[in-house]
Amino acid sequence: MKKLILLYFILTISLSSFAQQKSYGNKTIRGWILEKFPLHYSITPNKAMTYRNSINNKLEKYQELNEIGQPNGLTVIMCNDGINPGFATYFYKGESVYSATFFPNSNIAQLILNYNTNADLDGYKITRTPKESGGYTEEIQKYNNGVLVETNGVKTTPISIIYKDSLLDGFFKFESSPFVIEGIADNGKLKKIKQSQDNILMCEINFLKDSIKIKESSDYGFKLKTLPIISNPTITNSKSFCLKYGNFNGYPYLIFPPNFHVWDLIEIIPKHFPDTFTTKQNYIDNLLDGKFKYRQYKYSNTYSVDEYLNVYGIADKGKLLTLLLLSSGYDGVSATKYTFEGDLIKQIELDLKTGEEKSIIKTMKLEYPVLLTNSTRLGGSYKLSNNSWDESINNPNNMLRIPFKRKGYLEENKYGYAYFSPFTFDIDNYLDIVTTKTNKP
């Protein structure tokens, strides 16, 4: 009994190994050379038929058949000259496993395809493109049961993306519908990235020392262009890295969003972003304390990264003492300071050169003092209006979906507390809260 079981396993393994063996090479049939042919599908036909033109006797078709007259083996459709093949296909047990389309009036194949019996690409796909100067260029792809595993001798990167210390590193490949994105990165810096659809290259970027080389699909093949590198982001999977700095795309860091396309990089790289501005905040017992700073972008109908506020403040265990806003935009640069003294709030214009007070813009009464906290249990949260978020997937500057229109109101806060976050806090919202009388006990 044991011998029978052992023999069964040996036969099973042998048959499985035999079934999995695939070999490819040139196969010659009746003088026609079939390149990269799947030799494991070779059969001996029952008979072969030739079909000739009744007028000039030129060969029009050659076909191999099984015992009941079905295609089994090679079928060749000839060119009009009756000498060169036009199209060849090879059948195995009723399924097409190989096809070749030839250049006009030539015995050189322009396109070669290999399939398995499930009609999946399996084996070699060879594409030859004529050159105007003569000859042709060649791309050789290899498939394994429908999956591309090699291109021009280079193994295809599997779906994989690796971050070391939160920075993209090595070969990577991921899907961003309807495209496949793949490339090479070194410690977060891209070296090469390309985008393809259905194994057809759509766009490719090579990173040089101070420029990028772009190869982009067009109606007439590919168009090439070079752009300077002005902003070269470091690719990360850490949102905290991005939020540490003031730009919407996290520059100098960038997270690939789910709908990322290589064209987003072409928008970012040649663009000048404002200098990075490091976010700083500190809390004691969940209360904002000491010096803090952050950047807030202005909202306008024509959004621009050039319009923003650098905000500096001082708080004492949740109590806001001063707030300084340095505004930069198309109208120039200005400085405004808010002071909180007793029950009065002063809005003051500052001299940019000296930092001295120029004039008091407004004086407001503090009606509802609150302590700023990072605790949502105490401070609640700012409820932003529906149009406070930039929902445009085509805006490369707001990949983190940080609201730049911060208009909203506070909700679910405990009496005497207000939620603070450098990514949602807005002085106008805050003034609405503290200058409004409340009926809370």
Image (tube, rainbow, N blue to C red):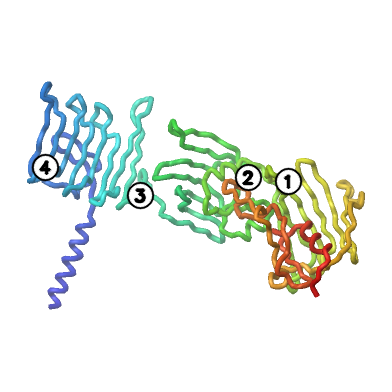
- The mark found on residue 231 in the picture is 2
Mark 3 falls on what kind of element? strand
Disc 4 residue type? Answer: Leu
- Tell me which numbered mark, 3 or 1, is placed earlier along the sequence: 3
Circle 1/circle 4 CB separation < 8 Å: no
Foreground tag (3 vs 4): 4
Mark pair 2, 1: CA separation: 18 Å
Seen from the viewer's position, the closer of residues 330 and 125 is 330
Circle 3/circle 4 CB separation < 8 Å: no
- Badge 4 is on which residue? 65
Mark pair 3, 4: CA separation: 32 Å
Foreground tag (2 vs 4): 4
Mark pair 1, 4: CA separation: 75 Å
- Badge 3 is on which residue? 148
Q: Quadrant of the C terminus?
A: bottom right
Q: Residue at x 25, y 50 (%)?
A: 116
Q: Is residue 440 left or right of residue 181?
A: right
